[in-house]
Amino acid sequence: MPSIFTKIIKGEIPCHRVWEDDRHFAFLDINPWTEGHTLVVPKKEHDYIFDMPDADYAALQSAAKKVAALLKSKLGCRRVCTCVIGYEVPHAHIHLLPTNATGDIRWLGQPPATSKPDLAKLAARIQG
């Protein structure tokens, strides 16, 4: 059964895409821990990131680096932090978290932000 990320990649579920190449897809998280929280996923499903073949793992990290540079340039943040948890969705993915300080990150399990960002506007800002 395809993961929710595979359905997003195939366009069966809407998302706010910010970047894509032939092997990877990057889109805004709908429950962001920071403004611009982006997920970078391989188009080919792998359940656990550290079970990926070395070449696929290296390519995913390289894609994440490209997207991090895009986020940093478009959002003007000091750093883009990364996080891999691996339990939320059975499809390998890397969280990219634009930040200016450690305190900017609202971690998984913390109360939701009081307002949701306009993801469509944010995606357009990152893309263009």
Image: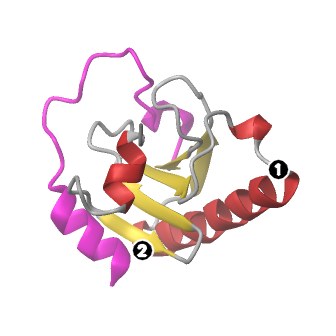
Q: Is residue 38 left or right of residue 79?
A: left
Q: Evaluate whether residue 48 shows in this view.
A: yes
> Callout 2 environment at 10 Å: few (<14), some (14 to 19), or many (20+)?
some
Nearest the viewer among 75 and 123 is 123
Q: Secondary structure at mark 2?
A: helix
Where residue 70 sits in the image (x, y, percent)? 51, 73
Q: Indicate which disc, 1 or 2, sits on the residue closer to the N terminus.
A: 1
Q: Looking at the figure, which quarter contains the N terminus?
A: top left
Nearest the viewer among 99 and 94 is 94
Image point 27% across, 16% down: which residue? Answer: 111
Within the image, what quadrant is residue 84 found in?
Answer: top right
> Callout 1 environment at 10 Å: few (<14), some (14 to 19), or many (20+)?
few
Where residue 17 sits in the image (x, y, percent)? 33, 66
Query: Residue at label 2?
Result: 74
Q: Secondary structure at mark 1?
A: loop
Q: Looking at the figure, which quarter contains the C terminus?
A: bottom left
Q: Is residue 126 above or below residue 79?
A: below
Q: Amino acid at mark 1?
A: Pro
Where residue 127 sits in the image (x, y, percent)? 35, 78
Image point 62% across, 60% down: which residue? Answer: 64
Within the image, what quadrant is residue 65 found in?
Answer: bottom right
Nearest the viewer among 110 and 86 is 86
Q: Is residue 100 in the magenta section?
A: yes
Which numbered tag is attached to residue 53? 1
Q: Which residues are magenta?
A: 99-128
Q: Evaluate whether residue 36 shows in this view.
A: no
Image point 26% across, 43% down: which residue? Answer: 30
Outermost residue on the bottom side: it is 128
Colour treatment of the image: secondary structure
